[in-house]
Image: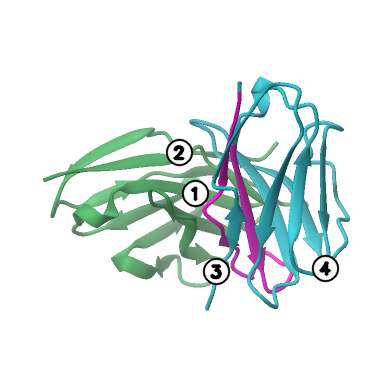
Amino acid sequence: GAGVSQSPSNKVTEKGKDVELRCDPISGHTALYWYRQSLGQGLEFLIYFQGNSAPDKSGLPSDRFSAERTGGSVSTLTIQRTQQEDSAVYLCASSLLIDISYEQYFGPGTRLTVT
Amino acid sequence: AQSVTQPDIHITVSEGASLELRCNYSYGATPYLFWYVQSPGQGLQLLLKYFSGDTLVQGIKGFEAEFKRSQSSFNLRKPSVHWSDAAEYFCAVGADDSNYQLIWGAGTKLIIKP
């Protein structure tokens, strides 16, 4: 079946602009995660959704970052007033349930470059 | 704070040679441990995981890993690498105050020499 998809695959934006990153999880997966991967570093957890609810937003780097999920499916990560330090690969993952014992399936990521 | 250390940023091995990628973690209790692989242009894929039981775990693509509590290590091994194994490998541990969050190492890039 279809895996996790993300769009766009690449995004170049000017400093100060807003961007929206989209994630389509595997159908039926109630848990959805957003991560940020900077060059030479491991994944940084940003936020997770259980259904449409995001119980823990403490991983978001600043108030310029927000995320939502609708219909228990598609999620968007929005970065307002982008800064150069936001340049990274943003990864989305989904799992059947919100528990570490359930495998997280990852999308290919969106590479964001802020110029 | 919890941490995961992958000491080798890059490793180069010849095709057909054996491989060991190192992973050390800090954790207070019995950890949940994972190895993921990220191939160019593809999403991260789970290779194997350890939750409990036999400390030697088998994964996909011929990989295995051994949990050594005394050394706080979870090293990944493969007896004979193939050119298709060239990728970046990430070790991760379940956060001790969360039932969903993973703490990730910085990754090891595996380069295969023909």
Viewer-nearest residue: A31 or A79 = A79
- Amino acid found under the numbered disc labelled 3: Gly
Residue A106 belongs to the span the image colors magenta: yes
Where does the image place residue B73, in percent across and percent down from the top left? 46, 48
- Amino acid found under the numbered disc labelled 2: Gln
Give the residue pinned by disc 3. A3
Question: Element under label 4?
Answer: loop
* In contact (CB < 8 Å): disc 2 and disc 1: yes
Residue stretch rendered in magenta on the structure: A89-114
Which chain does the cyan colour mark? A
What residue is drawn where x is 75% and y is 52%? A76
Give the residue pinned by disc 1. B91
Which chain does the green colour mark? B
Question: Element under label 1?
Answer: strand
Instruction: Using the rendered image, report if marks 1 and 4 lie on a common chain.
Output: no
Give the residue pinned by disc 4. A51
Q: CA distance from mark 4 to mark 3?
A: 18 Å
- Amino acid found under the numbered disc labelled 4: Gly
Question: Element under label 2?
Answer: loop
* In contact (CB < 8 Å): disc 4 and disc 2: no
Q: Quadrant of residue A30?
A: bottom right
Using the image, determine if residue A8 lies above or below residue A74.
above
* Mark 2 Cα shell of 10 Å, populated few (<14), some (14-19), many (≥20): many
Q: Is residue B57 left or right of residue B30?
A: left
Instruction: Using the rendered image, report if marks 2 and 3 lie on a common chain.
Output: no
Give the residue pinned by disc 2. B6
